[in-house]
Image: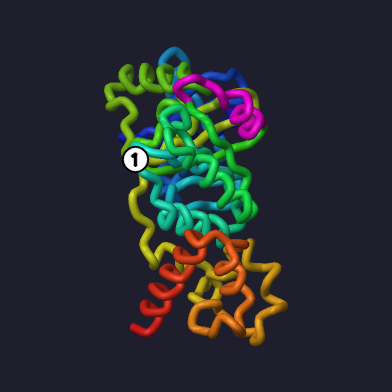
């Protein structure tokens, strides 16, 4: 049988079967350990059924992956929906920018959902939307508490495997329950049957939300360290290329090697755009901090 791995926990891999739509708890054969190949959520897998009634089986093989993420650990991802709240907790835009660079370096598209608009008494959400739409991202602003954005989010997730990521407390679990709470319960019941603990936020888990549509829930992240940004040879000089709103100003900079930090404003079109308010200062300041931290790390 063939299916998609939803999660791995306690030595079992939960596979959503394409053949009958059921979820099977499977153990990995020894060949996986021998080849040092760890199955991941999102993997397309071949498995054999060992106990039909209990929906248990063994993983036989996994298909070739189109991509692999290290953090969160997942395979065959079509895109990321990163969730931040407008307040409670306050959004850490430096963390958001680091995450956007991290995903951009792996050529994975990212959309942003700013949640909790219903308690936004200062209109900050609209400002956040302006910042990141200007940076070229698709931005949704709303609240999962009243379901205002459910239809828009469903359309965004249709026919895709999407990572749902964001810090703790921003409403990711509420979003999953809004989109499809039943799948979470089904996996929990199966875990209980084979006497393994139910899902916790420590594990990455895939949920089916329709035919060919999956979302991958991830543990809350509160930091993204510089070594994690340094993937595929990404250097401090590369960071500017992940700030798309800078791009149109490059031809106006005096030097082709301009990094838009230490150069005088009269020689740097990006700095002049920031001064005029054409580039949001929040984004520019995050760029400077991330660039300088990487630069310092490269000197060591």
In percent of width and height, residue 277 lies at 58, 62
Number of labels in the image equals: 1
In percent of width and height, residue 268 lies at 60, 80
- Is 91 left, or right, of 100 in this rendering? left
Q: For mark 1, what is the residue? A: 89
> Mark 1: few, some, or many residues within 10 Å (few <14, many ≥20)?
few
Taking the spot 53% from the left edge, 52% from the top edge, the residue there is 68
Which residues, given as a range, are shown in magenta? Answer: 144-158
Verify whether residue 155 appears in magenta.
Answer: yes
Taking the spot 40% from the left edge, 46% from the top edge, the residue there is 91
Residue 136 to residue 158: above or below: below
- Is 135 left, or right, of 48 in this rendering? right
Q: In which quarter of the image is residue 294?
A: bottom left
- Is 75 left, or right, of 30 in this rendering? right
Nearest the camera: 42 or 157? Answer: 157
Residue 236 to residue 208: above or below: below
Let me know if residue 65 appears in the view: no
Taking the spot 55% from the left edge, 73% from the top edge, the residue there is 238
Q: Quadrant of residue 247?
A: bottom right
Taking the spot 49% from the left edge, 83% from the top edge, the residue there is 262
């Amino acid at each position: 049988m063939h299916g998609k791995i939803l999660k791995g926990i306690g030595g079992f891999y939960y596979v959503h079967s394409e053949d009958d739509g059921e979820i099977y708890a499977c153990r990995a054969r020894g060949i996986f350990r021998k080849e040092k190949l760890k199955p991941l959520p999102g993997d397309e897998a071949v498995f054999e059924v060992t106990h039909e009634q209990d929906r248990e089986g063994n993983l036989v093989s996994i298909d070739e992956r189109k991509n692999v993420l290290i953090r969160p650990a997942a395979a065959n991802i079509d895109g990321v929906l990163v969730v931040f709240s407008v307040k409670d907790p306050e959004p850490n835009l430096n963390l958001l920018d680091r995450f956007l660079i991290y995903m951009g370096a792996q050529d994975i598209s990212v959309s942003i959902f700013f949640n909790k608009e219903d308690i936004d008494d200062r209109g900050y959400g609209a400002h956040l939307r302006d910042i990141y739409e200007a940076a070229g991202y698709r931005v949704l602003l709303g609240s999962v508490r009243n379901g205002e954005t459910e239809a828009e989010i469903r359309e965004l997730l249709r026919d895709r495997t999407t990572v749902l990521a964001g810090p703790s407390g921003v409403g990711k679990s509420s979003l999953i329950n809004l989109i499809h709470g039943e799948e979470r319960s089904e996996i929990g019941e199966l875990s209980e049957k084979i006497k393994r603990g139910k899902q916790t936020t420590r594990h990455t888990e895939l949920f089916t939300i329709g035919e060919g549509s999956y979302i991958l829930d991830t543990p809350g992240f509160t930091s993204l360290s510089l070594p994690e940004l340094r993937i595929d040879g990404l250097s401090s000089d590369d960071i500017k290329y992940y700030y798309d709103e800078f791009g149109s100003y490059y031809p106006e900079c005096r030097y082709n090697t301009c990094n838009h930090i230490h150069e005088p404003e009269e020689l740097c079109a990006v700095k002049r755009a920031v001064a005029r308010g054409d580039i949001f200062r929040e984004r520019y300041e995050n760029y400077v901090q991330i660039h300088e931290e990487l630069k310092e790390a490269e000197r060591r």
